[in-house]
Structures are given as C-alpha cells and as structure tokens.
C-alpha cells in the first residue's frame, strides 16, 4: 500500500523520467510498471521493475577511507539520493548505507527483491522490484497489475495446471520460459492485452 497521497499522472511524468534517467546506467534493464504504465490519470506510487548491474561506488558517508565498493547499482543510486536528502527509505529491506549489497542481484540472488523509498519532492512512494532476465516476463506482468488482473491471472494459471512461484511460471515441475510478458500470455493461452486495457 502506498504511503504517499495520490498525484496526477502529468505531475508524476517528470519524476518517472528522472528516475529512469538516473537508474538506467546502473541497470541491464528497467521499466516503469503499475498504474503509471497503465496510463491511469491519477497514481498513488511509482513502480519500477529492473535488472541491476554491479557498479563501483563510493559511500557518500564521511569516512577515513575513500574506498570504492562493488555494489548493486540500483541500491547505490537510491542511497546517493538518501544522502542528498532527496529520498527516505521506508520499511524493512530498504536502502541504508550499503544494505548488504554484496549479495545483490548480479551476484546470484535467486529471486526478485523489493524495497520502498519515499521521494521528498514531490512526496511519492517508489516501489522498486529487482529481478533477473528469466523472471522479467512474470514479474513485469504481475507488477503492472492492477491487483484484480494479477489475482485473476494467478487463478487462471491454477485452472490450467500452472502456478506462479519464485518469479517464474511453472507447469508441474517444469519451469516455463517467460523472459518477456508476451511469453506469459502465450503460455496462459490468453491474447495479449495492452497495459492500459488490463482491468
């Protein structure tokens, strides 16, 4: 659930553009999801799905040692915003110093991870979902929503003898290859639905 008040899509657009510009160099892939992707006129938060890179980063906290760390690039970018006073971590698993980044996605973490950040101006929550190439299709489909659409998709999968688990689509013990959203729709025997038409 969002911790920030709703804002007009038009007001959110420059924020989304700025985040994508900031994060893109630190990602193999990044895309906005959620209500913004569905083109709703009002949004409650910004959802980003990304595949982070490992980057060389200097901790902005004052230190006796100016040593670069190889860290998760998405965490590094948001940590920099935090030290600039432009973002505040929210809840468990959010950016704080290096937040165990040496166990980041590029170093073999098996599932998507999520954290929340509150941008100071404008006041809006950003939900960040970090994933891997083979999980991209499922994570992007589910995170685009809306919630009813995602729940119905999970129910439909069960009726077809499938299930969503660990960021993947399974048929029995077989993992189905869904690197793109369209692969998910194909496996589900469902015609492609544009994000803005998902209900």
Image: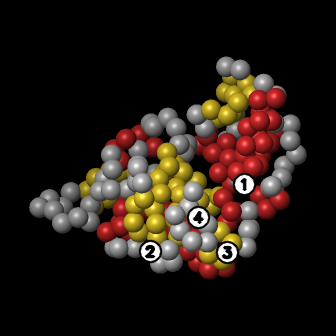
Q: Choose between 98 and 96: the one closer to the eye.
A: 96
For disc 4, the neighbor class at 10 Å (few under 14, some 14 to 19, many from 20) is: many
Residue 10 placed where, x, y %?
A: 67, 79
The spot of residue 96 in percent (x, y) is 33, 56
Name the residue rendered at 67%, 34% in the picture.
Answer: 164
170 sits left or right of 103 in the view: right
Between the residue at mark 1 and the residue at mark 3, the CA separation in whole angstroms equals 16 Å
Q: Secondary structure at mark 1?
A: loop
| Quadrant of the frame with the N terminus | bottom right
The local secondary structure at tag 4 comes to strand
* Pointer 2 or 4: first along the chain: 4
Question: Which residue bears the numbered disc 2?
Answer: 120
Q: Which residue is mark 3?
A: 9
Contact between marks 2 and 1 (CB within 8 A): the answer is: no
Report helix, strand or loop for mark 2. loop
Above or below, 111 against 5 in this view is above
Instruction: Check disc 1: other Cα within 10 Å, few if <14, some if 14-19, many if 20+.
Output: some
Q: Earlier in the sequence, mark 3 or mark 4?
A: 3
- Which residue corresponds to mark 1? 146
Please name the residue that numbered disc 4 is placed on: 46
How far apart, in angstroms, are the residues tagged by discs 2 and 4?
13 Å
Q: Residue at x 51, y 77 (%)?
A: 122
């Amino acid at each position: 659930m969002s911790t920030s008040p709703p804002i007009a899509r038009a007001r959110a657009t420059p924020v989304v553009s700025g985040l994508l510009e900031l994060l893109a160099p630190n990602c193999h892939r990044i895309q906005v999801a959620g209500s913004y992707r569905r083109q709703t006129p009002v949004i409650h938060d910004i959802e980003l799905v990304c595949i982070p890179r490992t980057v060389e980063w200097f901790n902005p906290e004052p230190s006796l040692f100016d040593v670069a760390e190889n860290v998760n690039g998405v965490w590094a970018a948001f940590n920099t915003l935090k030290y600039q006073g432009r973002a505040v971590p929210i809840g468990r698993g959010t950016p704080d110093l290096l937040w165990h980044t040496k166990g980041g996605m590029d170093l073999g973490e098996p599932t998507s991870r999520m954290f929340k950040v509150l941008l100071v101006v404008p006041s809006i929550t950003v939900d960040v979902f970090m994933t891997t190439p083979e999980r991209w299709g499922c994570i992007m489909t589910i995170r685009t929503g809306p919630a009813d659409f995602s729940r119905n998709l999970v129910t439909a999968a069960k009726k077809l003898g499938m299930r969503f688990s660990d960021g993947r689509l399974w048929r029995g013990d077989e993992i189905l290859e869904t690197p793109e959203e369209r692969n998910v729709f194909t496996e589900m025997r469902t015609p492609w639905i544009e994000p803005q038409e998902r209900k």
